[in-house]
Amino acid sequence: SDRETSPFEGLAPDDSREVTFHVGARCDRALLHSGLCGEIDWLWAGRIPNGRVTLIEGPAGAGKSLVAPDLAARLSDDRPWPDGTPQARRGSKALILCRQDDPADVVGARLKAMGANSQQCVQFHEFETIDHEDRLDIRPLALPLDLPAVGHLLRRDPSIRLLVIDALSDFCAGKGELAEVLHQLNRLASEHRVAIIATLRADVRFDRLAQVAVKSPFDTSAARCRWCCVRDPEDRRRLMFLPTQMNYAELPTGLAFRPGQNRLDWLEGSIDPYDPIRKLSDCGQWLSELLAEKAEHSKIVIGLGKEYGFSEGQVRRAFTEIGAKREREGYQEGSSVVWMSKEEFAMRHAGFGKRDEGGDDECGIRNAECGMVDGVQFGECRPAAEFAPITDADLAGEAPEAAAMGGNEVQCEIRPARPATAPAAEVDRPNGDGQVGRAASPGRILGVEELPWMGSPSSRLNPISMLLDRPNNPNQLLRSMKSMQSRESRKLG
């Protein structure tokens, strides 16, 4: 910096010498902003801000070139916005930059069909040029080269409050220039307090979570307010106008419309931007009905889905779509993953005991003594009449808490509460002679799946007892026994 002289003398405060820098033959003065406080000014409240660039992305045929002119037509005619919000300022104009379509029989006809005021809409996309040899020619508008000309038009007519660029890529030479143009357009919009709406082609789809996913070939990070146009996958004639980014307010609701001849018709109602597709897919509907009946193993569900014509990917996406839950049953060989509905998952993990406002159970014993761990009740309080009297023999080897509960009028059972079980079923199980015979299974719980098997104390030492303690799986039992017999035979041989 040079404290003696400054080329900004008379153009800047006296302290400008402190922030003036000589860069070769150029002098730069740093613009420092501090203590500024303001509020966002909205063209369309909560949706289109003034002084910023709003980007509308979407694939070809998604309605981008219908939404942008419709907003310009409503502004020029002082009509409410599509959601019924009135215009904040009357008598505003719109400046439209469109190079792809003819300004008369396409853009002009479209604005007329949308009810625009022709005196309040101005189109601009090219220059009339004369070279040094007095040759007359037409030159298309190029950005960022011609941004000063656009700024001059905005200064000349302050009633212009909306600048529409359809499409932004048509005026930029490459992807690198487009990113810089977005930065300069933000500055232009802030300087003249206008709203800039630019359309841009992008791939818009719904991911497996039914959320909007936008993939653009351009760097659009400078646009802090972004919308997209996409077809409803359940109704191809219905198009959706959805917000994807809003850095200045809460993400607003989306809208739906149907395209017509040079116009569009906005549909009633709003769309939740976090759940734009409320209707379940066919696979989601099938899976929801299946899991509503009972929990099922994941492999069985996938196999049933294939029988109904759904691929494994469709079934897994439907699992996420309906918000189903998964849980592993067992932790040793033969364990499996079970799929269940949200309701059944909540029922499995809900507390069974009742609590009063003081935090005690019905029996008057503190929650820790009744099996309350991290807010989940593992014990069950019942009247003492439902239990047989507790004897000294019963208390042998039990936790000391059980003895403390022996004299209460309401006793607390320190073990997981289970519903009634179905009659025991017979399965093939080896007897004492090593032969396979019929034995009773532990029985199946009605209404919910059995709790995961944790193994008996002897299962770590005796593989036979480990097999016998497992839930019903006779085929696995026979295969495991044959494998052990084969290993023993090889050792003896």
Image: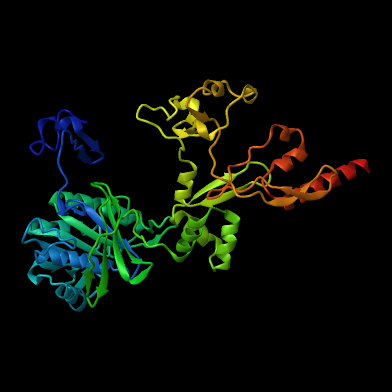
Q: 41 and 232: which one is in front?
A: 232
- Across and down, in percent, residue 473 comes to 70, 50
Residue sitting at the far right:
493
Q: 389 and 354: which one is in front?
A: 389
Quarter of the view holding residue 149: bottom left
Q: Quadrant of the N terminus?
A: top left
- Across and down, in percent, residue 444 comes to 61, 48
In this rendering, the answer to whether 339 lies above or below 239 is: above
Quarter of the view holding residue 71: bottom left
Q: 241 and 120: which one is in front?
A: 241
Any part of residue 265 in sight: yes
Quarter of the view holding residue 346: top left
In this rendering, the answer to whether 162 lies above or below 376 is: below
Any part of residue 379 in sight: no
Q: 313 and 387: which one is in front?
A: 387
- The residue at the point 52 percent across, 35 percent down is 386
**Color theme of the render:** rainbow
Q: Quadrant of the C terminus?
A: top right
Image position of 281 (left or right of 119) = right
Count of number-bearing discs: 0
In this rendering, the answer to whether 383 lies above or below 349 is: above
- The residue at the point 15 percent across, 36 percent down is 36
- Across and down, in percent, residue 63 comes to 28, 68
- The residue at the point 48 percent across, 41 percent down is 349
Image position of 197 (left or right of 282) = left
Image position of 214 (left or right of 311) = left
Image position of 272 (left or right of 206) = left
- Across and down, in percent, residue 283 comes to 48, 64
